[in-house]
Image (cartoon, helix red, strand yellow):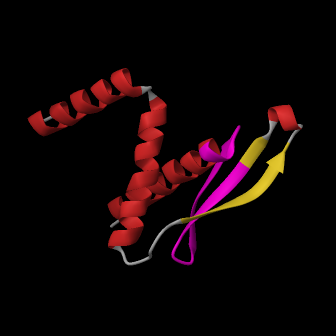
Amino acid sequence: MDEADGIAKTFFEDVVARFGGLQVLRHLDMRNVERVADSCGYGVPRYIILSEAGPDHDRTFTVEVHVGNKITGIGVGKNKKDAEQAAAAHALGKIAGESRTP
């Protein structure tokens, strides 16, 4: 690990420790999807609820995020926000994987 990687790792560990763990990182995922979509000229990502399941007190939401005309990620959560954040994380994982493909 080089010095820059060490600094980045320390920064994210500090952010997670100070500001609420994975919620912060998931919020960053949604912002990063917005940045990637905007920088590629696709506009604002759209989050679409695919399904709601379970009783009112124990709902599960499934959401997909569209960037341009493409479904980029799908996520599941106990509320709409968590499902959107999971979809954004999935989208970023796919984008990162595509950028590493020769």
Look at the magenta stretch and give its main secondary structure. strand
x 59%, y 50%: residue = 84
Quarter of the N terminus within the rendering: top left
* Residue closer to the observer: 98 or 69: 69
- 99 left or right, relative to 29: left
Quarter of the C terminus within the rendering: bottom left
39 up-or-down from 49: above or below? below
Residue 41 point in image, percent of width and height:
38, 78
In the image, which residues are magenta?
62-81
* Residue closer to the observer: 90 or 67: 67
Name which quarter of the figure residue 99 lies in: bottom left
13 up-or-down from 49: above or below? above
Residue 101 in view (yes/no):
no
* Residue closer to the observer: 18 or 2: 18
State yes or no: residue 64 in magenta: yes
Name which quarter of the figure residue 71 lies in: bottom right
32 up-or-down from 58: above or below? below
Furthest residue to the left? 3
Name which quarter of the figure residue 35 lies in: bottom left
